[in-house]
Image (spheres, rainbow, N blue to C red):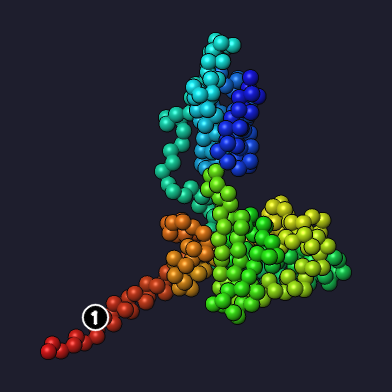
Amino acid sequence: MFTAMLNGWRNQQLARNLAFSTINSREKAVRAFTAHADAFPWVWSSQMADEWLGDLRALRNLKRSTLRNYENSISLFCAYLIDPAYQWAAECGQRFGTHPIQVIHEWNTAVHVQEAEADAGKRAFTRDELQVFFDHADAQIGEVRGRGRKGWLPAFRDAVLFKTAYAFGLRRNETRMLDAVDFGRNPEGAEFGDYGVVYVRHGKAKKGSPPKRRSVLTVWLWSAEILEQWHEEVRPLLPTAVQGACWPSERSARIGFTQMNTRFAAYRDAVGLDPALDFHSLRRSYVTHLIEDGWDPRFVQEQVGHEHASTTSLYTCVSSDFRTRTLRRALDATMDAILKPAGRAR
């Protein structure tokens, strides 16, 4: 019966066009709650949910957003079971003399009061930190090649990959899923050659929707130069490059998330940077540095694919130097206006 319930719920979510990863994650949460409660859904109670959620927070110290995802999964599963359209309550009543109920309520779940609940430690790179990180990535190419090892190709790939993620403000999956054909010319930026724009085809999707597409314009000449060198001189040396992915590995058509995360963490830790810096910090840095350099906020918002300016503002971690310069300009302008002699009335 429990398996049939899960299969039915899975089909309902598939009909809503939800991502397989979302469906699998929700099912995993339901199975975890079932194991903890040692009971099937038709005998679940709110007390069981309280004990499970309490253990998740007290023993596993889960983040707020993760805990809420678990709560939401159980709530949605219960809502599906008690929906008269699916007749699970009637079937359970006939077989077991009891029926499923909703065990997740307003009084036993975390309140969602902030738009963003990201870890407070997550931030952008400072410019100096970013330079140190990129310098270390570049140094690995020469170091590996100098030892006569063939691993210099993956090292070169990773250095360009990290720089590209920063240069275009890309998410991790957006970076990973780039193909060689996803770059093109920008008529208004001829100096960037064939790398004046990148067409992101695997942007973050809304729930139940396909990946969101967008185009991101090149803003720094150095990014076009490193991409040209990668595609023209280095990438063709990898035997898997013929399959079209922008970042092939030595054995497969496309680099994996584990490789990206492991290499990023290794470089970060090797130069002693803050452990709170993660791959997404490259995207935060892109937003922050463009804003600091005076780019129009609306342009930055369009570049990173945010629907609302408030979302872009959450990514902006402007430095104290930038704020000091901004304050100084404002004060100087105010003093100039005060000290400037008033014009004679005619």
- Taking the image as shown, residue 89 lies to the left or right of residue 222, namely left
Specify whether residue 100 is in view: yes
Quadrant of the snapshot with the C terminus: bottom left
Instruction: Decide: is 143 above or below 70.
Output: below
Q: Residue at x 60, y 63 (%)?
A: 199
Q: Residue at x 43, y 38 (%)?
A: 111
Picture quadrant of residue 222: bottom right
Q: Which residue is mark 1?
A: 338
Instruction: Decide: is 14 above or below 97.
Output: below
Q: Residue at x 57, y 57 (%)?
A: 213
Which of 181 and 288 lies nearest the eye of the viewer? Answer: 181
- Counting from the top left corner in percent of width and height, residue 231 is at 73, 70
- Taking the image as shown, residue 30 lies to the left or right of residue 300, namely right
State the residue lying farthest toward the right.
148
User: How many numbered callouts?
Assistant: 1
Instruction: Decide: is 330 above or below 110.
Output: below
Q: How packed is label 1: few (under 14 Cα within 10 Å), some, or many (20 or more)?
A: few
- Counting from the top left corner in percent of width and height, residue 284 is at 54, 61
Instruction: Decide: is 192 above or below 59.
Output: below
- Counting from the top left corner in percent of width and height, residue 247 is at 72, 61
- Counting from the top left corner in percent of width and height, residue 116 is at 47, 49
Label 1: element kind: helix
